[in-house]
Amino acid sequence: MPRSRRTAPSTLAGLAALTALTALAGGAAGLGSPAAAADPAYSVTTLHFEVTVGPQDDRQTCDVVGDLYVPADASAQGRVPAVLTTNGFGGSKDDQAGLSGLFASRGYVALSYSGLGFGGSSCEITLDDREHDGQAAAQLIDYLGGADGIAFEDAAHTRPVAPLDAVRLDGPGDPRVGMVGGSYGGQVQYAAAATTAKLDTIVPLITWNDLSYSLGPNNTDQVALPGQERAGVSTRTPGSVKTNWALGFSALGLTGDVANQQPDPIRTRCPNFADFVCPTLVTGATTGVLDDASVQQLRRASVASYQDDVRVPTLLLQGQADTLFNLNEAVATYQALKAQGTPVKMAWTEYGHSGDPAEGEIDFADPDPATQHITKRIVDWFDHYLKDTDASTGPEFSYFRDWVDYTDAEEAYATAPSYPVGSSSTYHLSSTPTSTLTGGALVTDPADVTTGEERFVAPPGPASNGEDLDVISTFFEQPEAAEPLREVPGTFARYDTDVLTQRVDVVGSPQVRLQVEAPTAAVTQETDAGKLVLHLKVADVAPDGTATVVRNLAAPVRVPDVTRPFTVTMPAFAHRFAPGHAIRLLVAGASPNYRGGTAAVPVGISTTAGASPTRPLPAQSLTLPTLAGVPDSGTDPGTDPGTDPGTDPGTDPGTDPGTDGPGTGDGDGSDDGSDPTPGTGGGTAGAGTAGGTGAAPAQAAPAVTTGSTTTLPDTGGPSSRLAAGGLALVLLGAGQVLLGRRPAGAPGALSPR
């Protein structure tokens, strides 16, 4: 059935963006009057909380504004558990009114608060730093546990309110409490869990693992951070900065609360942000690279740096429609928590920063567990861990299948007892196509590889290569294109399978093993800015020749050493390649959503007939995590099984799906092509019941066009205002640097390279 659009949470998303941009134009929203009861079953009171945050040598007091929801029957004699929640980036406590009201009506005390620097709360935005946002949340948890001297009626903290005595206690001052929230309101839960032992469980939605990867990803050269048992998304070599998301991010932070926090931003080092943020944006916009100091600051505000301190039961909900915090981030957190024994489960939802919830998934304004699958999972999770009921915590792993028609959203979710699922299916790059198309081919048999070379030029900076503009599309309706987006000729190499005669279901992170030739980059790669930058994409080629980049996802790669092979772990997705379609691998020199390289670089990708490939990731290959193996190219595997009737579970039927990790290659880019890690699809072939896959004999295909079909909210408004907001902050930061307001070596200063 069609999936309707619903209002997404106020993360880096449309409604918050419009509010922020209104402020940029001169409007300023003030804090409303104290909240009134919205339901006779509970009361709502707006309070101000005095919290002290920061490292011991730099403590500061902040005012946090929040709404307290108390069920009518909650009392000192009838205590109930509590739920704490806060906003996404650019939002406020009001964004969580739907969830707070839901839990209050179900017998929970709920406290929704505006995070530091947002929605009336003071102090700077520190990107969910544990010593700031984590400590603030911990003190609000203390208040829920009955602590005195924290809550007040006024922002000046002159009229204290009586201690709260309605929350169930696990011990003196220790409330039974969970946290829920999305994006910025998701990461703070990790910060709180690592700060206080009083938090009992968390449900982070669509948030990050390593913010340096989120804003400047590199999909090769992964490395385990200190204290980690395995590599996640963090990398030795910095990646390529997401220019469009950075503009939206900076616009929201700059304008969101300037009026009540920093009325004279020109005299401020970095308006509304911690000082390091502006130089980070300046460096990234200029060179495309996050410098070492910026990476360390961003990781400081990321669960990847302190995951061993997160020990409470965790339900990870991550969006498939998300080019900001992609599924790899949730996978990294899930696998790290799982390895250390933290109770954790993971679900890949339909919605994210790049698209709205599906029909019957979740409605943040009007959540209803009776009709919304994800809302019910959250409610059941809290009922289980906070109320000690026998409510199910759900499957270990589940994912939304956008190709399934359903009457209940739960029917669109496939489940599995573990992640990863399925098996690995490897295609080899071949330079001679098996159709009338120009370009290369993807073949299943190494013996079918033909000697040849694909050559292109990686252009400097971002360029339009078949994708929608990430954040612009999310904030504002993208104009109708006169024709499908086209890859710019001469800036990419592409490799296509034969036309599929059976469906191919991919669930997980594709991996690409490449060896390229780039002599000019070999000369300049001693510096990060001089390294070769590529952007890999998997596209679905329809029978009419239109190619859609799956979920608008690109995998930027800053190659550590172009003289050696490297492994690319691409953003994960769940996607069905239908019969009659083809699978395409694009190795592009640019993306409209990333800063890319700083100079034009000629690139060659060679293939050799008769080469004996190493296993399990041979050079010049694409490995897909599929729910069933792919038969040989050029053979007819049998009858087309038809379309999915909507009951396909896509799950492992009981065989071990494998425990292999995400496949990080050699880390330093210095391997000889014998990478031992099989990638996310690894393990034995627990093929599931999703059906076979296949490739038909060679046949002609139409001309090449590309496009994106991400589901995007229609929020209206001109995109130029968003760009102006972000540019204002970048220019302000540049001015601060040029004027010498931050001496070399000072915190937040640009470090020389």
Image: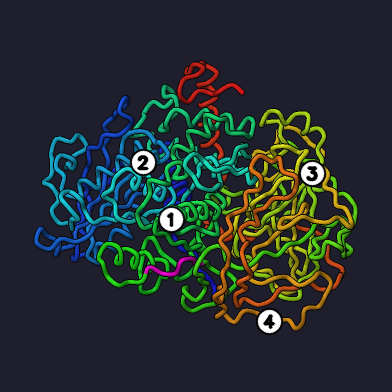
Q: Amino acid at mark 1?
A: Leu
Residue 232, how many percent across, how many down? 54, 48
Q: Which residues are magenta?
A: 393-398
Q: Disc 3 designates what residue?
A: 516
- Dot 1 or dot 4: first in sequence order is 1
User: Rounded to the nearest whole Å, what is the CA distance between mark 2 and mark 3?
Assistant: 46 Å
Side of 559 relative to 194 (left or right): right
Dot 3: few (<14), some (14–19), or many (≥20) neighbours within 10 Å? many
Foreground residue, 294 or 668? Answer: 668
Q: Dot 4 surroundings within 10 Å: few (below 14), some, or many (20 or more)?
A: few
Measured as percent of width and height from the top left, residue 511 is found at: 67, 55
What secondary structure do most residues of the magenta stretch adopt? loop
The residue identified by callout 1 is 205
User: In the rendered view, does 74 fall on the left or right side of 628?
Assistant: left
| Quarter of the picture holding the N terminus | bottom right
Closer to the eye: label 3 or 1: 3
User: How far apart in space, not on screen, are marks 3 and 1 (Cα)?
Assistant: 38 Å
Q: Are marks 2 and 1 in contact (CB under 8 Å)?
A: no
Instruction: Indicate which disc, 2 or 1, sits on the residue closer to the N terminus.
Output: 2
Which residue carries the number 4 mark? 642
Picture coordinates of residue 649, whole percent (x, y): 55, 76
Is 640 placed left or right of 182 in the picture? Answer: right
Q: Three-letter amino acid code at disc 4?
A: Gly
Q: CA distance from mark 4 to mark 2?
A: 51 Å
Distance from disc 1 to disc 4, alpha carbons, whole Å, reads 35 Å
From the viewer's perspective, is the residue at label 3 or at label 4 nearer? 3
Residue labelled with disc 2: 118
